[in-house]
Image (spheres, rainbow, N blue to C red):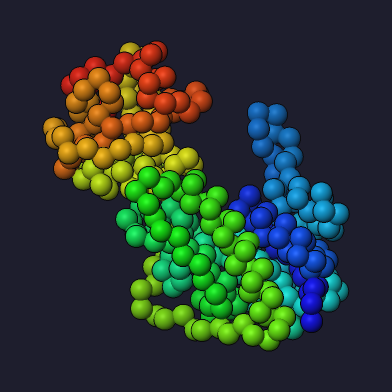
Amino acid sequence: MNGLRIVFMGTPDFAVPTLSALVGHGHEVVACYTRAPAPAGRGMALRFSPVHEASNRFGIPVLTPSTLKTDEAISEFKHHQADVAVVVAYGMILPKAILDVPPLGCLNLHASLLPRWRGAAPIQRAIMAGDAEMGVAVMKMAEGLDTGPVGMTEKLTITPNLTAGDAHDRLSILGADLMIRAIAALSRGGLTFIEQSQDGVEYAKKLTNDECRIDWSQSAEQVYNQVRGLSPFPGAFTMANFGKGPERLKVLRAELLQTSGQPGHVLDEHLTIACGKGSIRISDLQRAGSKPMSAQEFLRGSTLAIGTVIG
């Protein structure tokens, strides 16, 4: 068996490299399932998902069902006569009736080294937790949240300056290559799946606004990991007063320092902020209603005087 008949299911930018790789390697992607267009931007015009846009470029039929649990949706899925379904950040739960349709199963590309960080925000959670490595995994989908057996993984070292945005881009490319290798092995009958261990299971729950606000009483390392794990979106933030009342200030990049002081106090003219232990120096940030900028750009038009308390 060479090229397979594939139903692709995905929504965000992260999924596009895998879809492109499948097409580029000669597989027949017979349909793409993605989330329905949603209002976006100031004009609230309907915007296609990145996978929808990519599918249109490739000439692949697109489906945007609101549910996969109806008899009609299941019948339509069967009609594709796909060998396998490939799922990458689709954003909708697949019922057992769908999972059982493709003879080679439904393969999911998940952005973590399962069983650590099952769930919605694995990239952010891994960096925020101070993990030494992260990765991507191809698993055979089963009922339950990211509980299926794993066929292949690829690791990525979390270097000191790596942000969630950096990791997202690298893992999307690593993941596309991993899925291509997994599909090739699957087509030869050579992809072995290993059940996930129940030890070390962590859940990467959705991020809340409260988790994005910086608590300066934490150690500098904790704040630093929070900044990296939430950059560029949704962004770790603090409140600061520039003369017109408190406003939200996103911290996008920073560096660790050993200097100390009262948590939340500005220590110098270079945006060094004291934490519970140590300090961080802000290097990239974003004021409310403004574009991201470097600290140098920011300091040319704004000031936070030494001794100012932010939070």
Is 198 situated left or right of 119 in this image?
Answer: left
Task: Give whichever of 290, 163 is nearer the camera.
Answer: 163
Q: Considering only vertical position in the picture, is 74 above or below 300? A: below
Q: Position of residue 280 (x, y in %)?
A: 26, 36
Q: Is residue 115 visible?
A: yes
Is 176 situated left or right of 155 in this image?
Answer: right
Q: Position of residue 292 (x, y in %)?
A: 48, 28
Residue at image location 45% in from the left, 26% down from the top: 293
Task: Give whichever of 41, 169 is nearer the camera.
Answer: 169
Q: Position of residue 277 (x, y in %)?
A: 16, 42
Q: Is residue 119 visible?
A: no
Q: Residue furthest left?
A: 261
Q: Considering only vertical position in the picture, is 33 above or below 79? A: above
Residue at image location 44% in from the left, 42% down from the top: 231
Which quadrant holds residue 72? bottom right
Q: How many marks?
A: 0
Q: Considering only vertical position in the picture, is 216 above or below 114? A: above
Which quadrant holds residue 41? top right
Is 65 situated left or right of 229 in this image?
Answer: right
Task: Give whichever of 248, 220 is nearer the camera.
Answer: 220
Quarter of the picture containing the C terminus is top left
Residue at image location 84% in from the left, 72% down from the top: 80
Residue at image location 79% in from the left, 82% down from the top: 1
Task: Give whichever of 30, 154 is nearer the camera.
Answer: 154
Is 168 situated left or right of 92 in this image?
Answer: left
Q: Position of residue 168 (x, y in %)?
A: 52, 51
